[in-house]
Every structure is written in structure tokens, then in C-alpha cells.
Amino acid sequence: MMKLLQVHYLCLRINILRVMAFELPKLNYDYPALEPYIDAKTMEIHHSKHHAGYTNNLNNAISDTDFKNQSIEEILKTENLPTAIRNNGGGYYNHCLFWEILSPTPKPGSKAFIDLIEKTFGSCDSMKEEFGKAAATRFGSGWAWLCAQNGDLSICSTANQDNPLMRQGCGGTPILGLDVWEHAYYLNYQNRRPEYIKAFWEIIDWAAVESKYQASL
């Protein structure tokens, strides 16, 4: 009887951990769908290897900690995060956002959202130029971001897998992000990061970006 109870408890614990564990998200499109802008092999490796690695490592890092019952946003906003949780939590969250704002059939934002971009940056082209500069000048590996804070927009970049949600991040809620780690583009673009940045604009789903902006209000 005691052994049965122990087995039952163990099964319950495993089920709870399965519920709380972060999962690699399924994409809304196939790996070749973003070609020629992002090639299928890069997408496959990026999603099934790199993002999967961050996901698994995050789950391992938070097991047996209080973080296992928190959302990824709550985790990332915590001060003095252990390095493994900061790096893998950032990698998990950043890539989730990245896949969500890409689409083989991108939709435009509303006139109101476009007006907000133009009011903030002067024009959509100016916004792209500022964002592109943030992405191109990020030394080494990192991300460029369009952020929302109190209804306002701003652009910044972060190193490694850091993001604006983190303490000492560049501030606000990220609504658009571009991965400038070499694994995101090297097979197709090699060291030509500016070409990768230019291609990025062709596959952004601005309706998804706007939805994230609205959720930040």
C-alpha cells in the first residue's frame, strides 16, 4: 500500500511538472515559408535546435525553484536572476516573440498604429532606419527591439539573450524583435548582417506587432 501511495505521489508530481514546464511553441508556418528572406534550413535549426535548447535548459534551471510556478514575464522581471535562468529564459521568451511577429503573408497595422509610428519617429522609413542601425551596430550577439511603454514607442538593443523586460534592460515591453545572433542568418547571409536586416522588413506581420502594442497598454 505504501509503495502504491509513493508511486501515485510521484506520478502526480511528474504531471504537475509537465503542466508547469515551458514548451517549445509550434510555428504558424512551415520552415520554408519565409523564403527567400529566411531559408528553410536556418529556420529548422533555429527553431528545433536553438530555441528547443533554450526551452529545455530553462526548464532544467527552474526545476526545484520558486520560478517553476511563474510566467516567463514574471521570471524575467526578477532582480538578480541566476545566469542560467537569465540566459535561457531570455532565449525562450525572445524567440517566442520573434516567431509570432513573422509571417509569410504579413498583414499591415491599422492607420492609428501607423500614425503612432510616424508621430514618434517622423516616418515609417525613419523608424526602420533607426531600428536597422540598432540591429546593425549591436556588437557580437544580441537583439534589436521596438518597445512600448505607457503608450509610447522606443527603439533599443540588448546583448546576448537579454531583453527590455529585464532589470537594467532598455525599458518597456518588446513588441517587435530581431535576432542578430549569427545562427539566425549566417547560412544565407554569412557576414552580411545589413542584408538580413533589410530582408526582415518583408516578413513582419504588423497586425501581430500592433496586437502586442495593444496588450501592453
Image (tube, rainbow, N blue to C red):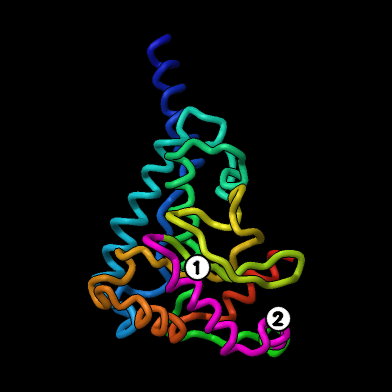
Find the magenta span and give its range.
115-141
Which secondary structure is most common in the magenta stretch? helix
Q: Residues within 10 Å of mark 2 (few under 14, many from 20)?
A: some
Question: In the figure, 6 relative to 215: above or below?
Answer: above
Q: Earlier in the sequence, mark 1 or mark 2?
A: 2
Query: Residue tagged by mark 2?
Result: 120
Q: Quadrant of residue 39?
A: bottom left
207 or 5, which lies in front? Answer: 207
Residue in view at x 73 percent, y 85 percent: 119
Query: In the image, which disc is placed on residue 144?
Result: 1
| Residues at marks 1 and 2, CA–CA distance in whole angstroms | 17 Å
Total numbered circles:
2
Question: Which quarter shows the C terminus?
Answer: bottom right
Q: Which quarter shows the N terminus?
A: top left
- The image quarter containing residue 49 is bottom left
User: Helix, strand, or loop for circle 2?
Assistant: helix
| Residue type for callout 1 | Ala
| Residue 158 in magenta stretch | no
- Mark 2: amino acid: Thr
Residue 176 at x, y percent in the picture: 55, 71
Q: Is residue 170 left or right of residue 180?
A: right
Magenta residue check for 131:
yes
Residue furthest to the top: 2
Camera-side residue: 143 or 110? 143
For disc 1, the neighbor class at 10 Å (few under 14, some 14 to 19, many from 20) is: many
Q: Say if 129 sits above or below 216 in the image.
A: below
Which numbered disc covers residue 54?
none
Secondary structure category for the residue under label 1:
strand
| Residue 182 position in % (x across, y down) | 31, 65
**On the picture, is 161 further left or further right than 164?**
left
Q: Which residue occupies 65% across, 59% down? A: 171
